[in-house]
Image: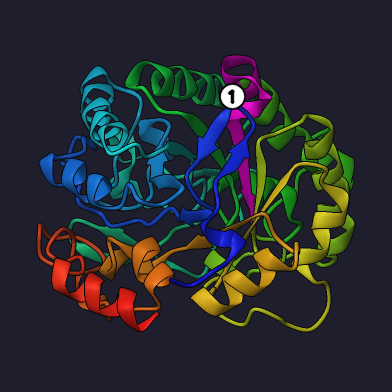
Amino acid sequence: MVSSKLFEPYDLGPTRLSNRVVMAPLTRSRATDDQVPKDIHVEYYRQRAGAGLIITEATNISPEGRGYAWTPGIFSDEQVAAWKRVNDAVHEEDGKIFLQLWHVGRISHPDLQPGGALPVAPSAVKPEMKAFTKDGFKDIPAPRALEKDELPRVVADYVKAAENCKKAGFDGVEIHSANGYLLDQFLRDGANKRTDEYGGSVENRMRFPLEVVDAVVKVWGPERVGIRISPVSPANDLADSDPEAVFVPYVEELSKRGLAYLHVIEGETRGNRDPAGFKAWSLRDHFKGTYMGNNNYTPELAMERVDKGEIDLACFGRPFISNPDLVERMKLGAPLAEYDERTFYGGGAEGYIDYPALTVEERARYGQAA
């Protein structure tokens, strides 16, 4: 067996994790047209309950928050009931699971919006991106800028979604403030051109994301709320002229709130871990709670960084797609199964719940070799 602190239990506030391996949020686009998880979601998450913590795929807080076909929601009773079945399955396997609260902002299309409306955003700045709709990829139009008096409504959508997560039996929630979606759009000057108290200065640009955080914390308590950020990622055509000037004070404000963890995309999403300029992992020095590292982690890198105390939790994405028993494989030093990228988005069981775990014979063989 491989020896590392990565495989030791960890107390995430009141949530006892069996190990320090986290399953990252992974959009798979397999929900119904009404954004309801299916039976295959129950099996998918049950299979991966060996992770110390599962963070669900990004989940729409409202009909307006949707930006991709067949993604799940957490705003209807039917969705809550379906997620409860997922949570029951994970808990039966002694796993822990947080839901990621998601509003995509401008990364959407009228085909995905109620009544064919334009997507909303802090400002009417068009991203050079395509949206994944039921009819394939379509160019994203310029969004509609949210009026100031609409912002409380959006905060209320986060609150209702957070309350629904409690009803569904989640262990906590993660606020999605990364990858070019709504809260990230407010933070970064590449998308936020507002001239009111929600734009301009860094303090103003942080205002709306922090209002969302504070509202969700009132529902769950800070010890069961995490947050995800991607300070230097250009995902979804978003950038900032000075990310360090934005994210250092943002993280310091998050730290004051005593959140369960800070989940950081270290570098470019699915890309370079160490781009020139500001180093995202330096934000650990500004956050007094649990630090979760993510982005192209290998088992070796995760073990090295956890054992050195550079991170508290290591988050894996794509390896969990094809390795439902990822933690056990890493413990045994067993090879990881390759994923089939053709089956990442949309479809059914293929490429979703049909990746096999190690057999009893394989576990014994790798265990002896280790």
Q: Residue at horizontal 83%, vertical 78%? A: 277
From the viewer's side, name the closer residue of 318 and 212.
Answer: 318
**Which portion, as a residue range, is magenta?**
216-229
Above or below, comparing residue 356 to residue 56 in the picture: below
Quadrant where the N terminus sits is bottom left
- On the image, the x and y values in percent for residue 13 come to 64, 31
Verify whether residue 332 appears in magenta. no
- On the image, the x and y values in percent for residue 41 come to 20, 45
| Image quarter of residue 255 | top right
Verify whether residue 221 appears in magenta. yes
User: How many labels sit on residues?
Assistant: 1
From the viewer's side, name the closer residue of 309 and 125.
Answer: 309
Residue 354 falls left or right of residue 252: left
Say which residue label 1 marks. 155
Query: Residue lying farthest front?
Result: 368
- State whether residue 267 appears in this view: no
- On the image, the x and y values in percent for residue 273 come to 64, 78
- On the image, the x and y values in percent for residue 293 come to 63, 61
- State whether residue 165 appears in this view: yes
Above or below, comparing residue 241 to residue 186 in the picture: below
Residue 369 falls left or right of residue 3: left
Residue 178 falls left or right of residue 170: right
Q: Residue at horizontal 56%, vertical 70%? A: 295
Quadrant where the C terminus sits is bottom left
Above or below, comparing residue 341 to residue 265 in the picture: below
> Element at badge 1?
helix
| Image quarter of residue 307 | bottom right
| Image quarter of residue 146 | top right
At label 1, which amino acid type do we have? Val
